[in-house]
């Protein structure tokens, strides 16, 4: 049980990708970023990156980080978005399974311990990243319509977050 909670605990909790401090990641030895797409980089209904996101990705590059998008969404959505961002992507990822994380890491040529996964879902992004010993960053999901199934998962996620907060396990 203890182990399960640890696997569900993000290393950092931030309101958005723009609140991530590069130094925090660098201090932990992070060189690579594995980025969730939907509700993390952009709303589900936003087909292309906006100017703010492009600037953030440029900044990440200038700061010495390599990035790869890792999404459970389908090829068309993911590759269109990633190409416009100028970063590689792995689609249909079946997170939290490890295989796709490893493929993303291989793409950018970093070991799991040197990579941060940044995403909005505990049971896919955080769980998958923690299983591989990656640094995990949970962001507040961007607003927008979600599937019924996802809305249900959000309820459970909020319960998990409350539990973790009570245990003092959350850092921002
Ligand atoms: Mg997401």
Image (spheres, rainbow, N blue to C red):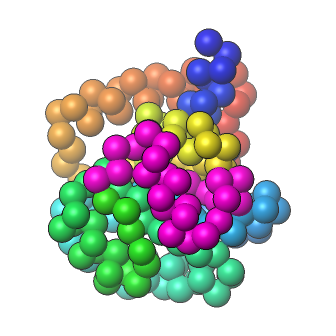
Residue located at (65% from left, 65% from top): 110
Q: Is residue 32 left or right of residue 80?
A: right
Looking at the picture, how far across and down is residue 45, in whole percent? 19, 62
Looking at the picture, how far across and down is residue 114, in whole percent? 71, 60
Q: Is residue 78 left or right of residue 147?
A: right
Residue located at (40% from left, 43% from top): 95
The answer to whether 121 is drawn above or below residue 160 in the figure is below
Residue 24 is drawn in which quadrant? Answer: bottom right
Residue located at (58% from left, 50% from top): 137
Looking at the picture, how far across and down is residue 163, in whole percent? 57, 21
Q: Is residue 64 left or right of residue 157?
A: right
The reply to whether residue 115 is visible in this rendering is: yes
Q: Is residue 73 left or right of residue 103?
A: left
- Residue 44 part of the magenta-drawn span: no
The answer to whether 59 is drawn above or below residue 144 in the figure is below
Residue 37 is drawn in which quadrant? Answer: bottom left
Q: Residue furthest right?
A: 27
The answer to whether 28 is drawn above or below residue 125 in the figure is below
- Residue 109 part of the magenta-drawn span: yes
Report the label total. 0
Q: Residue furthest top?
A: 1
Q: Which residues are magenta?
A: 92-118
Residue 155 is drawn in which quadrant? Answer: top left
């Amino acid at each position: 049980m203890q182990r399960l909670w640890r696997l569900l605990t993000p290393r950092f909790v931030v309101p958005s990708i723009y609140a991530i401090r590069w130094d925090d990641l660098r201090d932990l030895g992070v060189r690579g970023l594995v980025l969730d797409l939907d509700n993390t980089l952009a709303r589900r209904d936003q087909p292309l990156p906006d100017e703010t996101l492009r600037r953030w990705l440029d900044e990440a590059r200038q700061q010495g980080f390599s990035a790869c998008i890792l999404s459970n969404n389908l090829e068309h959505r993911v590759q269109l978005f990633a190409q416009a961002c100028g970063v590689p992507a792995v689609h249909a990822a079946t997170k939290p399974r490890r295989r796709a994380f490893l493929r993303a890491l291989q793409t950018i040529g970093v070991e799991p311990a040197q990579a941060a996964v940044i995403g909005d879902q505990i049971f896919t992004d955080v769980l998958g990243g923690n299983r591989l010993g990656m640094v995990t960053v949970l962001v507040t999901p961007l607003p927008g319509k979600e599937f019924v199934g996802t809305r249900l998962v959000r309820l459970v996620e909020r319960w998990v977050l409350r539990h973790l907060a009570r245990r003092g396990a959350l850092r921002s």
